Amino acid sequence: MMIEAYYTNNIEQMHNIKKIIHESTLSEYDKNYQTLMTNGFLALMNPKLNSEKLTSTIKNKIFDIPSYTQDKLMLYCDFMRFYSLSDNEIITRNILKQYQSTNDSNIQELILAIVCNILIFSIENDKFENVSYFLNKIQNIKTTPQLLFYKIDIEFFKNIIET
């Protein structure tokens, strides 16, 4: 529900989700975690709701997860905007190093989404010196129906950068 509300930019639904979380039978830990994620998505949807404390808390929560598991990759991908381009490049290099030979299509999908974000941030910041590294690292990921959307996006962003 949270992801759907985020991708449809439905702030009202996101607030409803916070109410559902608050009224749920989740443990206090899970309620706090889910509320933090909801607040993070709200901050991405409306930067006025962002704060240094929220950004820091989410960054710490992501990196409290000891290794780059699928869950951590998903969280990182969702909240990459909270990091600088240079921090994102360093983190993504580590992720690519860890998963350079994975055949897990779910991990590959997350890697492609992360690289898409890197390309977007590079375009936004008009900084392209490291783009070729990331494009080269994902070259060997085969196009499958599951990955097609990301592969097309990457080609689109690559063409923008090259022009």
Image (cartoon, rainbow, N blue to C red):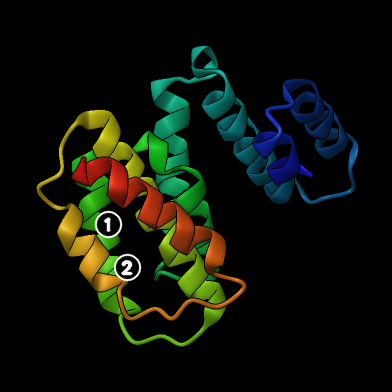
User: Looking at the image, can residue 149 be seen?
Assistant: yes
- Residue at horizontal 54 percent and vertical 16 percent from the top: 49
Q: Are marks 2 and 1 in contact (CB under 8 Å)?
A: yes
**In this view, which residue lies farthest toward the top?**
48
Label 2 Cα neighbours within 10 Å, binned few <14 / some 14-19 / many ≥20: some
**In this view, which residue lies farthest toward the front?**
163
The x and y percentages for residue 153 are 45, 52
Residue placed under numbered mark 2 in the picture? 95
The x and y percentages for residue 70 are 52, 70
Amino acid at dot 1: Ile
The x and y percentages for residue 50 are 48, 20
Residue 92 figure quarter: bottom left
Which secondary structure, mark 1?
Answer: helix
- Residue at horizontal 14 percent and vertical 52 percent from the top: 130
Which secondary structure, mark 2?
Answer: helix
Identify whether 101 is placed above or below 97: below
- Residue at horizontal 42 percent and vertical 65 percent from the top: 111
Mark 2–mark 1 distance (CA, rounded to whole Å): 6 Å
Residue placed under numbered mark 1 in the picture? 91
